[in-house]
Amino acid sequence: MTKHGTDQAHWYQTNFELFEKNLNGEASSRVHAMRKEALVRFAQTGFPTTKHEEWRFTNVAPIAKVSFQPSFEAGVVGLSREDVVRLSFGTAHQLVFVNGHFVEHLSSVGTLPRGAIVGSLASALKGNDELAHGFIGKYASIQENPFTALNMAFVQDGAFLYIPQGTVLEEAISLLFISTGTAPLYVAPRNLIIVGDRAEVTIAESYFSLATSGTLTNVVTEIVAGEGAIIEHDKLQNECAEAYHVASLHVHQKGKSNFISNSIAVGGALVRNNVSSVLDGEYAECTLNGLSVANGTQLIDNHTVIDHAKPNCPSHELYKSVLDDASRGVFNGKIFVRRDAQKTDAKQTNKTLLLSDDATMDTKPQLEIFADDVKCTHGATVGQLDAEQMFYLRSRGIDETLAADILTFAFAGDVVRRVHVDGLREQLETLVHAKLGKGRER
Amino acid sequence: MLQINNLHASINGKEILSGVNLKVQPGEVHAIMGPNGSGKSTLAQVLAGRESYEVTEGEVLYEGKNLLEMDPEERAREGVFLAFQYPVEIPGVSNTYFLKAALNSVRKHRGLEDLDAVEFLKLVKQRMKIVDMDESLLNRPVNEGFSGGEKKRNEIFHMAVLEPKLAILDETDSGLDIDALRIVADGVNQLRRKDNAVIVVTHYQRLLNYIVPDFVHVLVDGRIVKSGTKDLALQLEEKGYDWIKDATDSTLATA
C-alpha cells in the first residue's frame, strides 16, 4: 500500500467518526453495519493506483493528495431557484441535490402514478423502507472498486425511486446534482432505482458545479430492472474544470427488460465513469452509449461492463470521444458471455476524434466468451477530421473553422441524438456546442 | 473569365499536369476530354483548390485575380464550383443544413444578408425541381446512402442553389443511366447564363449530346494536345483516343 493510501484511509476514518456522531441514533441500523464494513474495506485498499488493471490509464493520485471534507449538509447558501432553473431541462419531476443532499424546497416531485416513489434515499432509509434497505449495496460490490467502498462508507442521501410494475411514467425524472462551496468537498450521492415488471421510466442524472474549488463527486447508482421493464438512463457530467468525478452505475436486468444508457461527459479535471449491466434473464436488451468532449488537460475515462449471463440477449455499445489540446481519453469495454448465454449478440464500437496532436486516447475492448454459439463484434477507431470531407465542405464556400465545427459536431451529435428527452437533448446540444466552440476561441 | 497559363501540377512528386493552357470566356461551355490518367480530374481538383496537389509552375487567373492563392472556400465564394466525380458522404450533417451554411457563406462574401429559414426553404424547393430531385433527400445526411445517380443530381442541385459563375463538372455523367443523364444535363442547361461558364470534364462524348460545348479540348499526358469544336468530340467517339495519341506522338517525333 502506498503512503498516500494509508494517510487517506486515516483521514476518512477520522471523518467517519465525525459522521457517526451526526447520524442521531441511526447508527444501529443494518445500513450502518454496511457503512462500517465498507470503511474497513476502503482502509484495506486505499485509492487504486495505476498498478491495478482497472486503473492502468487513470492515475487518481491527484485525488488521493487532497484532503477533501466530507459533506454532511446541503450548504444551499447563495443558491437560488433561478440557478436551479438555469441548469434544468424542464420536466414535471425533479429532485435537486446540493452537495449530495436532497433539498426539498428546490425540488418538484410532481404528480405521480399510484404507488410510485420519487424521493430521497435519506428519508427512505430513515422511514425503514423495505425496498431501500433490501436493495442498497446488492449490486454495487464494495469488493471490486475502492471508490464504491468509499461511497458506501459515507452513504447518506441521494435519490430513491420506485416505479411499481406496469406503471409508465410519461415525463422524465430529473436528478439534478449541484455542488457549491469554496473548500474541496467530498460529495457522495447514492441513488437507488427500482423499476417493476413492465414499468417504463426515463431518468436523467445531471451534475453541475457552482463551486470555486475542486469537489470530489463519488456517486454510485444502482438500478434494478424488472421483467420487461423499459428504462432510459441519461447522465450529464458538466462540473467545473477543477472537479473530480467518479461515477459507478450498476444495472441488474431481468428477462425482456430493455435498458438504455446515454452518458455524456463534458466537464471536470478527472472523470471516471463505470457503467455495468448484468443481463440476468433471457431476451434482455442493453444499449450503452457515451460521449466525452475534453480539452485542456482533462482526462475522461469510461469503463463499461456488459455481463451476458443468460441466453438470447442483444447488447449494443457506442462510445465516442472528441479530444482537443492535451486532453486524454480512456475507453475500456468489457463484455462477458457466460457459458449459458448462447445466442448472445453483442456489438461494441469506440470512435475517437483527435483535434490536436497532443491529445491521446487509450482504448481497449475486452471480450471474455465462454459460450460457443454467439455473435460478438467490436471495433475501435482513432482519427482526425477527414480530409475529403473537409475539402468537400470548403469547396462549397464553408470556411475551415466552420467546416471543422460542423464535422466535429456531427461526430458528437451522433450520441447526443440518442437521448429521447427533447428538453434534455437540446440542453446537451447547447452544452456540447459551447464546449467545442470554447476550443475554437483560443 | 478564366485563363490558365502553362500550368504544371504534381502529387507526391509525380507530375500530372505538364503545361496546360486554357482560356474560358463568360457564356462559354468547354469540354475537356481525354483518356484515363490524362490529368482531367487533376485539373478540375487543382482549380477547386485541392491541397494535396502541388502547383509547380504556371498561373491561373480568374476574373483577373490569382486563383491559386485563394483557399478553396474563397474560390467557392468568388463563384467557382466543382461538381465532384465522387461526391463525399457526410454522416450526421443534413443536406439542408450543409447547403444553408454554404449558401450563407457565399452570400456573406457577396455582401448579402443570410437567408432566413422560410426564404431558404422556398429557394431550395424551387431549385430541386431543376434536377427533379426527391424532397426526402433534403433532410438526409449529405450523400449518405444516396444512389450513384442521386449523388450526381445532388451535386447539380447544390450548383443550382449556389449559382456559380464558373462550374466545373468532373465526370458528372459517370454512373448515370440515360434518363438520369438527360435530367442532369437538362439541369445544367437551365442554369446557363450569358455571364457564367461551364467546364465539362468527361471521358465519353455522350454527355456532350445534351450539354453542347463551344469548344472541345483533348488532354493527353497532362497537356492539351488538340482543341476544336463539338465535332472533335464526335471524331473521338468514332476513332478513340489512340488516333490523337498517335498523331501527337508523331508530331513530337518530328518536332
Image (cartoon, rainbow, N blue to C red):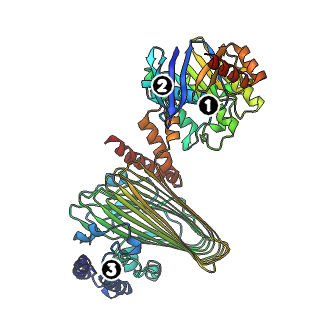
Provide the residue designation for mark 3: A153
Within 10 Å of the Cα at label 3, are there few (<14), some (14-19), or many (20+) other Cα atoms?
A: many
* Number of marks: 3
Q: Could you tell me if the residues under marks 2 and 1 are in contact, i.e. CB atoms within 8 Å?
A: no
Q: Nearer the viewer, mark 3 or mark 2?
A: 2
Q: What residue sits 35% from the left and 83% below the top?
A: A38
Within 10 Å of the Cα at label 2, are there few (<14), some (14-19), or many (20+) other Cα atoms?
A: many
**Is residue B123 at least partly visible in the picture?**
no
- The first of marks 2 and 1 along the sequence is 2
Measure how far apart labels 2 and 1 are at the Cα level. Answer: 17 Å
**Is residue A412 at least partly visible in the picture?**
yes
Name which residue type carries label 3: Ala
Provide the residue designation for mark 1: B155
Let me know if marks 1 and 3 both belong to one chain: no
**Chain ID for label 1?**
B
**Chain ID for label 2?**
B
Name which residue type carries label 1: Glu
Considering depth in this image, is B22 or B29 the residue closer to the camera? B22
Q: Is residue A244 above or below residue B31?
A: below
Q: Nearer the viewer, mark 2 or mark 1?
A: 2
Provide the residue designation for mark 2: B75
Residue A77 spot, x, y in % from top left = 23, 60
Identify the secondary structure beneath mark 3: helix
Q: What residue sits 43% from the left and 80% below the top?
A: A141
Q: Could you tell me if the residues under marks 3 and 2 are in contact, i.e. CB atoms within 8 Å?
A: no
In the figure, is residue B78 to the left or right of A181?
A: right
Q: Is residue B147 above or below residue A53?
A: above
Let me know if marks 3 and 2 both belong to one chain: no
Considering depth in this image, is B43 or B144 the residue closer to the camera? B43
Locate the N terminus of chain A by quadrant: bottom left
